[in-house]
Image: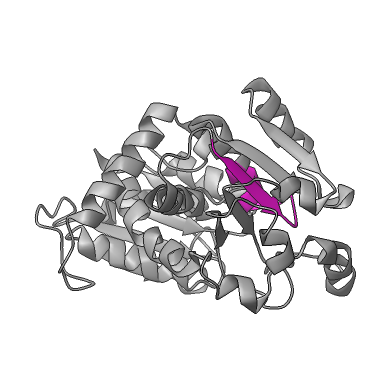
Amino acid sequence: MKNFINISDHSSIDLRVIIDEAKIRKLSRKGFNKSAPDDDKPFEGKSMAMIFEKPSTRTRMSFDIAAKQLGGSSIILNPDGIHYGKGDETLKDTAKILTEYVDIVMLRTSSHKNLEEFGKYLDIPIINGLSDKSHPCQIMSDILTYEESNGSITGKTVSWLGDGDNNMSNSLIEAAGKFKFNLRIGCPKKYAPGKKILGWAKENKVNLLITQKPDDAVKNSDCVMTDKWVSMNDKVNKKTKKKVLKPFQVNKKLMKKANSNAIFMHCLPVGRGEEVTDEVIDGKQSVVWRQALNRVHAQKSIIKWCLD
């Protein structure tokens, strides 16, 4: 049984297999309706339970469509509508029940510990749809999107601007180690990556630069990325955080520091006029809408890999 919880859990070879499979499956769907199943229907007769502790648009839609395209089905569960470790049923018993009903579970949670605890009691694979510590499916989709635009990401330079201590930056650091690309994080000292992920980066020889100068983070970069400055469960003074991060806004002037063929990515939802200007996100270098679509294709490959 194979889970997909963190990018760091897997070998570079397995991660490359997932990306390459996603490319092949996407190409093979030319001319298909959006929810039509793939010709081989590898998920036929199977189902996926999706549990959402947090609101979701792209994760909910993309996993549901991924299951359909693979020839199977999905069941969306709201924690408030099931036992999920509440009342007279323990988390362990809820996991055991789901093991009997479905073939795989996707969990989007506010607590990474919930993900690990729930997965411990499942006898079927679990996929991390997002946690407070990592967002591996999004980053796998981002790598797929980059390679569609500019070829192999190995040896290229990716820039991250804004909060350097969130789930996206954590998974991006792990991906830099596994796919061997250069990563530059431009962030205020207050929002630098945590000690644990930096320790992992050092141990795995990640080519990582952390700087408080946005220009240095973006100079000659092949890809510029950012994220919403204040996440859903961010328990901070929003006004203060936005003020601290304002110098790290991705705008036209900053994008000019990157390579001429550099692309812009954002995992969405977006704070227009905050972490990025309309001119950039709606501009020619932006690939954010294809990035959102590629969640479907990357996640199809992840589901199939977990069940193979």
> Which image quadrant for residue 111?
bottom right
Q: Which image quadrant is residue 46 in?
A: bottom left
Q: Quadrant of residue 194?
A: top right
Q: Residue at x 63, y 47 (%)?
A: 221
The percent position of residue 173, horizontal first and vertical second, equals: 62, 39
Where 18 sits versus 177, above or below? below
Considering only vertical position in the picture, is 105 above or below 79? above
Q: Nearer the viewer, residue 174 or 79?
A: 174
Residue 175 in picture, x, y percent from top left: 54, 38
Residue 281 visible in the picture? yes
Residue farthest front in this picture? 260
Q: Quadrant of the N terminus?
A: top left
* Residue under the point 55% across and 76% down: 282
Residue 251 shows up from this direction: no
Horizontally, is 192 left or right of 250 in the view? right
- Asked which colour scheme the image uses, the reply is one colour
Q: Position of residue 299 (x, y in %)?
A: 36, 54
- Is 127 or 241 nearer to us in this picture? 241
Residue in the picture at 52% in, 40% down: 6
Residue 240 relative to residue 308: left or right: right
Q: Is residue 164 magenta?
A: yes
Q: Quadrant of the C terminus?
A: top left
**Image position of 269 with respect to 262: above or below:** below
* Residue 307 appears left or right of 223: left
Magenta stretch, residue numbers? 156-172
Pick the residue in front: 133 or 111: 133
Q: Is residue 242 magenta?
A: no
* Total number of numbered discs in the rendering: 0
Q: Which residue in the rendered view is the most extreme toward the left?
A: 39
